[in-house]
Image: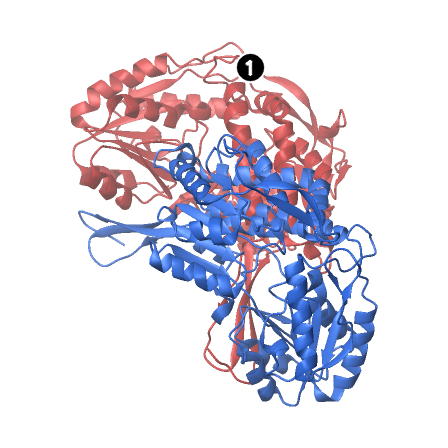
Chain colours: A red, B blue
Amino acid sequence: IKYNLYEFLFINNQWEDAASGKTFPTINPATGEVICQVAEADVADVDKAVKAARDAFRWGSPWRRMDASHRGLLINRLADAIERDSAYLAELETLDNGKPYAISYTVDLPTVVKCFRYYAGWADKWEGKTIPIDGDYFCYTRHEPIGVCGQIIPWNFPLLMQAWKIAPALATGNTVVMKVAEQTPLTALYVASLIKEVGFPEGVVNILQGMGPSAGAALARHMDVDKLAFTGSTEVGHLIQQASGSSNLKKVTLELGGKSPNIILSDANMEDAVEQAHFGLFFNQGQCCCAGSRTFVQADIYDEFVERSVERARRRVVGNPFDLKTEQGPQVDQEQFNKILGYISSGKREGAKLMCGGGVAADRGYFIQPTVFGDVQDNMTIAREEIFGPVMQIMKFKTLEEVVTRANDTKYGLAAAVFTKDIDKASYVSNGLRAGTVWVNCYDVFASQAPFGGYKSSGNGRELGEYGLDNYTEVKTVITKVPQKNS
Amino acid sequence: IPGGCLTEDLGKVFPAYNPATGEQICEVQEADKADVDKAVQSARVAFSLGSVWRRMDASERGRLLSKLADLVERDSVYLATIESLNSGKPFLPTLFLDLQGTIKTLRYFAGYADKIHGTSIPMDGDYLTFTRYEPIGVCGQIIPWNFPLMMTAWKLGPAIACGNTVVLKPAEETPLTCLYMAALVKEAGFPPGVINILPGFGPTAGAAIASHMGIDKVAFTGSTEVGKLIQEAAGKSNLKRVTLELGGKSPNIIFADADLDLAVEQAHQGVFFNAGQCCTAGSRIFVEEPIYDEFVRRSVERAKRRIVGNPFDPTTEQGPQISREQQNRVLGFIQSGISEGAKMECGGKALGLKGFFIEPTVFSNVKDDMRIAREEIFGPVQLIMTFKTIEEVIERANNTDYGLVAAVFTNNINKAMTITTAMQAGTVWINCFNALSTQCPFGGYKMSGNGRELGESGLKEYSEVKTITMKMVTKNS
């Protein structure tokens, strides 16, 4: 690999300077120090990348003529190369994002590899149908790629979000222009070098680092991009959808924020529920779209649950991400750090009871103490808005009907969970919650095979699983006249 | 069987031959009923609830199949050499077609393992209901000698992807590459008992599998004659599920507007490929009257050019027949063709002093009721008949108990659509022949078999569907 590969954009299997020559720094959030400078893409670079992707998609191109099974083979080879370099990638991920190395290496990287392997398997199995229509006709559908797909990914799981996006897009035969988060550009660029190494034709995958309002917006309103997939905040999701409407009506899928309810019934296994609720909120420094950020606990077990949760939060090890004992690293940047501290203030101001934490955890970097609020009322800011940090809200409820109503009383609908041993209560609650994923007696269980996505303002469309292929497919119906149809 | 490839007592052995020379390559242990019992027992244990195999992530089953594919790819030159030596198939096509087909099939099904979906269903009433696609259990698999490695992959791929355990008997003529695969299965890391491989004979080991009370499903590829015995045995024993991929007498229909060069070459390969030893052989070639004479002339010229020889010679197109028995059988059919009045345009005799070679043979003026036109020859014998109208050729093409494949050569879209709808065959090719790929379901109508292999359809045969219905307090949509 080039020593300074990160200073370039990846377009057409080449490493290119940004047209403007501008660069921006990427920061190590554990120390606040600059890791290196990175090329900054803007409108001109987006144009160039889209042209490369369009050319790679032209009728008769190597990518269009390739056997579907061979696309799958290339994706499998990419998975193998990532697996080969996982120690390096995990280090780079931790350096740039702040997540503990033990987690990058044992959770993020294997999950990335599995995602690529899963979609590699789908490439030659995504079948259209033949259909018995009325009349003397032979009718079939083709599952064609949409074309040039813009993909904008966030900073909370940089490698994993890259895999979730490019794996299904490539399996179905599309070409990609990806804008990575400005906070975490490094690992995606390294994967670009592997994409070239394993033999994807030029222009099939193009990767740009840059800012949302410039490069991201240029991609969202580009007249020659056929589809845009965005994962990030609901606020920006609104902008992306509007940009599609005011440009070329490109297909849009969105995976946005959440304020996910985690419902603990009185017959739940207390130990499991406390640990899972803790994990469901605090994992990844609280920076998960599906964080269980409203923990509803049934009245008769409320006091014990709060006490145990506070004790667990106090035990959470915050520190240097490269220390293998560390459970929680820094927040990703200054902006997030300030925002979270602001929410903590609002919690105190609005009368929630601060049970532990509430402040800064270290002298440098963006570390925040694991924080627990009790006696949270539904109308408080910390109960309604997505905090995206290590701040847990615990509320009390009496009956099942009440809690399902309160749980659904949000503009979001990404995930939810229920802890109970009772078979009827489990099915009642899981069927009643308006959320794209419902976990029963577990939290944050993800698998490449299972679709994931949001109801309401948490997004539209599903990623992962077979359903994930729909977003990257145009269905063409072909009808041929025949002399005489027979069944 | 777990513990290695050898059973404790070095009991009976049988020879494996090189059909290019007739000489013995080596001896192989012969499995009989007691060995089948032992293998079934180990497959049953490997399948028990709570076992390593049952508890394994579906995606991990896929990883193991992928690993096996990688190992086959690693050793493909060695495998192609042994395959060629034991079956007489020319080496280069074996390396480029058989080995690639084997690897691709394993990889295809590796990709399916974690994509076998049941459904959740909006049934009437206050119920939550969904289906699980479970493995059937212990699957007996009996494969033929014409494509030993590919047939192994076609059988193992879907069975393993769906989570079954397997007892596989390779053909007695060609046990060697299958046994090497067993070593790769172990190297890939499959848990013991998941895949068991027993070389042996049909009437003993094969029959024991077909009638075993402890086997849940049997899959057989081979002759229609033996297919019937398998079906009977299943009915007499435990009603095990049966899928059969049997013989064929497949029609290849050439219209006057076809690209003649293409049609002649495809029809030639379609019947002579693998020394005529394909279930898909296009063994009844119907040529529209206006081009009949020219078609026969070109086909004879092509057959005369076909190079028969040592499988390891890179110019060889055709190796020997698999055995003396098969060679004699084919020569017998040739004699019957002559005596029933067909016109032998070329070939007709055995070739060479050693091995089981036969000259590429072409008959013209074949009548539909001749033995050679009705029965499966399984040798390098091409039959060319003529037809006048499309209605006539459809009726004659379908006038057979078989129904494996069919093909049509024409430029006319309407003729193509009409023929493809009318053919009673599991695969119909338009302007091509033997275009097979692991993504496409393959199997027979009528007495060419039942069930489909390959493609998503191939998975259905290896799954048992369980519907689970749970009472709910109240249902909402």
Q: Position of residue B140 (x, y in %)?
A: 45, 49
Viewer can see residue B183 = yes
Q: Secondary structure at mark 1?
A: loop
Q: Position of residue A410 (x, y in %)?
A: 32, 40
Residue B266's x, y, as percent? 72, 69
Q: Residue at x 66, y 71 (%)?
A: B332
Which chain does the residue under circle 1 lie in? A
**Front position in the image: A185 or B60:** B60
| Residue A276, above or below B356 | above
Q: Compared with residue B276, is residue A42 higher up or lower down, i.e. above or below?
A: above
Indicate the quadrant where residue A309 lies. top left
Q: In the visual, does B250 lie left or right of B122?
A: right
In the rendered view, tell whether residue B94 sits above or below residue A419: below
Q: Which residue is mark 1?
A: A322
Amino acid under label 1? Phe
Residue closer to the observer: A374 or A153 = A153
Within 10 angstroms of label 1, few (less than 14), some, or many (20 or more) residues?
Answer: some
Above or below, B317 relative to A229: below
